């Protein structure tokens, strides 16, 4: 019995180290292929209770990606990161490091229709006049529809789902409402690897101004093994 306990706690320690070393990620699936997005971290993000993706958060996100050589102006950038709302799947639209909403006039418009399970919160912000609606679809599923407007190179917009550890799958449909003619490869999926952000894949709107994808959360391999080991030891104790 003592030998088993020593083995169990040693295994827990080893697996804890593995779970820290191996990143959590989501797999994005679309008509353009699959992209793996590993998670970074942004402390203080998505901290409010009003479903607002704060402009200051958007500025920090844009600045961080720019510092790693990723252009965000004219782009729709999707990232996975640990935030105050849990491990969050975030979209930054036409991000600039310093926004100036004073006197801004929305000239870019993006429609979003996105679903996930009922177990997490949503966040969205655009310029004045942007619209948001939330629906309980039943079957433990929620839907957010948003029309986000912003002023190109003066402001930006953002959308996010909170804790993907509990709401592990989702769908996102994007609509270039006024056919703004975003730049080529305007949709980019960004991953965090080797202590920096990098573009994992790009995509474009269809000729009808639409783009759709789904995502699936994948826990760190160490966490999966840890859960399996805990289950094994629980079964062993019950048998005794």
Image (cartoon, rainbow, N blue to C red):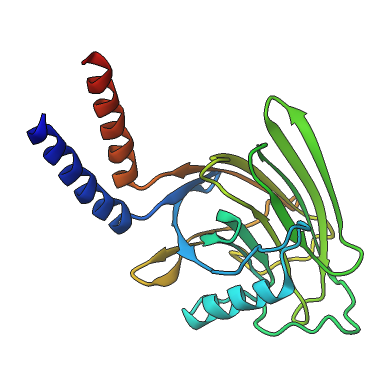
Tell whether 58 sits left or right of 151: left
Residue 85 vertical position relative to residue 227 in the rendered view, above or below: below
Quarter of the image for residue 61 reads bottom right
Residue 54 vertical position relative to residue 207 in the rendered view, above or below: below
Tell whether 184 sits left or right of 54: left
Q: List the single residue furthest toward the top.
A: 239
User: x, y (%) of residue 87?
Assistant: 53, 54
In which quadrant is the N terminus drawn? top left
Residue pictured at 51% horizontal, 61% vertical: 81
Number of marks present in the image shown: 0
Residue pictured at 55% horizontal, 41% vertical: 166
In this view of the protein, which residue sits in the foreground, 181 or 52? 52
Residue pictured at 10% horizontal, 34% vertical: 2
User: x, y (%) of residue 162?
Assistant: 62, 52
In which quadrant is the C terminus drawn? top left
Residue 84 vertical position relative to residue 236 in the rendered view, above or below: below
Tell whether 63 sits left or right of 237: right
Residue 195 vertical position relative to residue 167 in the rendered view, above or below: below
Q: Is residue 159 at least partly visible in the picture?
A: yes
Q: List the single residue furthest toward the front.
A: 2
User: x, y (%) of residue 85?
Assistant: 61, 56
């Amino acid at each position: 019995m003592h030998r088993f306990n020593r083995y169990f706690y040693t295994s827990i320690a080893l697996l804890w180290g593995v779970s820290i070393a191996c990143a959590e990620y989501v797999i994005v699936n679309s008509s353009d292929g699959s992209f793996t997005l590993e998670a970074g971290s942004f402390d203080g993000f998505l901290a409010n209770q009003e479903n607002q993706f704060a402009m200051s958060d958007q500025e920090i996100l844009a600045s961080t990606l720019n510092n790693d050589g990723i252009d965000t102006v004219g782009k729709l950038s999707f990232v996975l990161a640990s935030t105050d709302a849990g491990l969050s799947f975030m979209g930054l639209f036409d991000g600039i490091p310093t926004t100036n909403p004073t006197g801004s006039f929305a000239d870019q418009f993006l429609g979003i229709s996105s679903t996930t399970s009922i177990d997490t919160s949503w966040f969205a912000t655009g310029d004045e006049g942007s619209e948001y609606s939330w629906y309980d679809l039943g079957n433990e599923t929620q839907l957010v529809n948003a029309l986000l407007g912003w002023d190109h190179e003066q402001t930006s917009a953002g959308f996010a789902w909170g804790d993907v550890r509990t709401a592990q799958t989702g769908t996102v449909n994007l609509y270039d409402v006024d056919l703004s003619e975003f730049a080529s490869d305007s949709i980019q999926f960004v991953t965090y690897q080797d202590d920096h952000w990098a573009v994992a894949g790009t995509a474009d709107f269809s000729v009808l101004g639409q783009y759709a994808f789904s995502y699936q959360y994948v826990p760190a391999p160490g966490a999966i093994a840890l859960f399996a080991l805990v289950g094994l030891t629980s079964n062993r104790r019950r048998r005794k």
